[in-house]
Amino acid sequence: MFLLTGDPCTAGVAFSFFGVSLMLRESIEQLRREASDALNQAGDLGALEQASIKYLSRKGLVASLFKQLGQATVEERPALGQLLNELKQELEGQEALRKAALTPKATGPSFDTTLPGRLPWIGSYHPLTLVMREIVDIFARMGFRVADGPKLSL
């Protein structure tokens, strides 16, 4: 078998006695290693975005392998399509994990320090109100209830 090395997208120009499927499987595995290394070695969000565009965008290398899927035999397309879908999901998961690791965490107070403070309670209840509440509490403990109704005039 004669296989050209280099970019997985240009690996479609190869001569194979075993058919396109073997070449496509090798391209998938090569792309899996390259993309995984590129996503894991991204040092900042900009580099991660560039790697994501290179491999996962609509015109990226994974999409070009999906286009090459049409060259495979009818019997092998489902297996190759499953491999490509697994590759894409794996790379998207790695990208999400790496993005979460590179995103700066918010530090500082968890409340808004610009809001005005709460004013302390000023004042107290009238002494008659306090006595009335205490009397109602005593009778409530003895089993009585407070009932409110119309006033009677005699």
Image (spheres, rainbow, N blue to C red):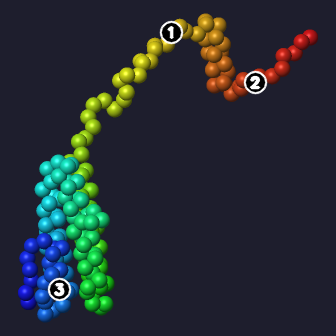
| Amino acid at the residue labelled 3 | Leu
- Looking at the image, which is closer to me, 13 or 98? 13
**Residue at image location 30% in from the left, 65% down from the top:** 58
- Identify residue for label 1: 122
3D distance between C-alphas at marks 2 and 1:
31 Å
Crowd tier of the residue under label 2, counting other residues whose Cα lies within 10 Å: few below 14, some 14–19, many 20 or above = few
| Amino acid at the residue labelled 2 | Ala
- Relative to 21, say whether 144 is above or below: above
- Relative to 106, say whether 44 is above or below: below
The residue positioned farthest toward the bottom in the image shown: 17
For label 3, the SS is helix
Nearest-to-viewer mark from 1 and 3 = 3
Residue 29, can we see it? no
The mark nearer the N terminus, 2 or 1, is 1
- Looking at the image, which is closer to me, 107 or 148? 107
Q: Which quarter of the picture shows residue 54?
A: bottom left
For label 1, the SS is loop
Q: Are marks 2 and 1 in contact (CB under 8 Å)?
A: no
- Looking at the image, which is closer to me, 104 or 70? 70
3D distance between C-alphas at marks 3 and 2:
90 Å
- Identify residue for label 2: 147
For label 2, the SS is loop
Residue 22's tag is 3
